[in-house]
Image (cartoon, rainbow, N blue to C red):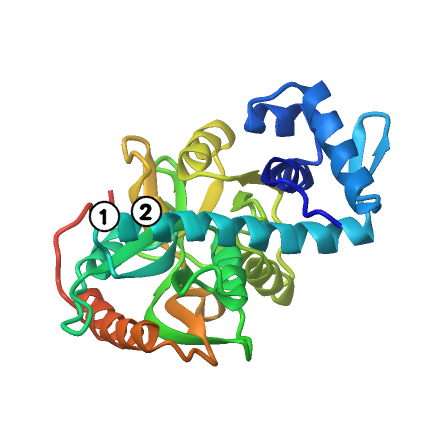
Amino acid sequence: MALPEMRLLQAAIVLAEELNFSRAAARLRIDQSTLSKRIAELESQIDIRLFVRNHQTVELTDAGRHFVEDARSAVLYAERAIADARAALHGADEVLHIGRSAFADPYLVTAIQSIQLPLFPSLKVKLSSNFSHELARMVAAGTLDMALVISIPDTQVLSLLSIAEEPGYIALPKSDAIASRDGLNLEDLRAHEWIVPERHINPYISDMIQTAASAKKIVPSDTHTFTTAEEASALVLARKGSAFLTREAAWRISCDEITIRPLVEENLKLVTGLATRADEKNRLTREFARAAGRKLVKVQHTPRQGKSLAC
């Protein structure tokens, strides 16, 4: 059986992520008719039904879920092969593929980019951004060599070097009665509307917030979700609510009308770590991970100027 073309795999992956033909077609920059034809062609070629269409809804079949997961890895491997070939064309003997959470401290990302290994003078680092749980999956699958992640659950497949542990942050209007406090806990937010990250951003953090709230029998007056810090900022001002953010996300919010305060909850600490495969055999990856670990810990504890969060 001939292998499906890349364009067909990409169509299935994007449709699985969007579960909407209109949005998926827009992402792929094709029309819905073309997308439908590609999905039909793929299903016919592999003789497996991947999606169930019912009026306006689209759902993945069980077979489709398995197929898309492996297809995503196949596409990533192909993209990695192209990137490695291009790097070799420009003189790089070795290439490391490193992922980073979009919410990771930019100083740590800069530190990773500055690492040099004497035994690998032509090393090239390729960075990519994604959500932490996706980065962890990609490291486990071998499509990334390592990744800078925030708060992922322990797993036997990965080795996680802890770089930093810090609280989450709460963004709320300066006019709020509790805005002047040095730190906030969940009890302080009992009567507030909560603005929390969409679960797909980091399911583990979402579960941590829910578990901590349930343990204290706290139910917010209403709950809203966001994908970016800018969306959270707009919701804080519109709903007069409290947004749960990482430190890096908090830095990105304008402080004209919003105050940022640390969340003083022992069970809601956010851990930044460097994830590698537990059974990693590649010498370059091991050497780089050790060097990165030493440098990242040092950078994390180096005093630096930055935007105040108490504004």
Q: Residue at x 48, y 64 (%)?
A: 139
Identify the residue at horizontal 12%, vertical 52% (top origin).
305
Q: Give me the disc on residue 262.
A: none
Q: Is residue 119 above or below residue 213?
A: below
Q: Position of residue 278 (x, y in %)?
A: 47, 79
Q: Residue furthest front?
A: 1
Quarter where residue 204 is shown:
bottom right
Near-viewer residue (144 or 241): 144
**Whether label 1 touches label 2, CB < 8 Å:** yes
Amino acid type at circle 1 is His
Looking at the rendered structure, the secondary structure element under dot 2 is helix
For the residue pair 246 and 60, the one nearer the viewer reads as 60
Question: x%, y% of residue 234?
Answer: 44, 29
Which numbered tag is attached to residue 86? Answer: 2
Q: Residues within 10 Å of mark 2 (few under 14, many from 20)?
A: few
Tell me which amino acid carries mark 2: Arg
Q: Residue 90, labelled with which disc?
A: 1
Count of residue discs: 2
Relative to 183, is 294 above or below? below
Determine crowd level at label 1: few under 14, some 14-19, many 20+ residues with C-alpha closer than 10 A. Answer: few
Asked if one can make out residue 180 in the rendered structure from this viewpoint, the answer is no
Left or right of residue 214, residue 262 in this image: left
Q: Secondary structure at mark 1?
A: loop
Horizontal side of 140 relative to 42 (left or right) equals: left
| Left or right of 75 in this view: 101 | left
- Do we see residue 148 in this rendering? yes
Q: Residue at x 74, y 38 (%)?
A: 42
Taking 71 as reference, is 20 above or below it? above
The residues bearing labels 1 and 2 have C-alpha atoms spaced at a distance of 6 Å
In terms of depth relative to the viewer, which is nearer, 79 or 115? 79
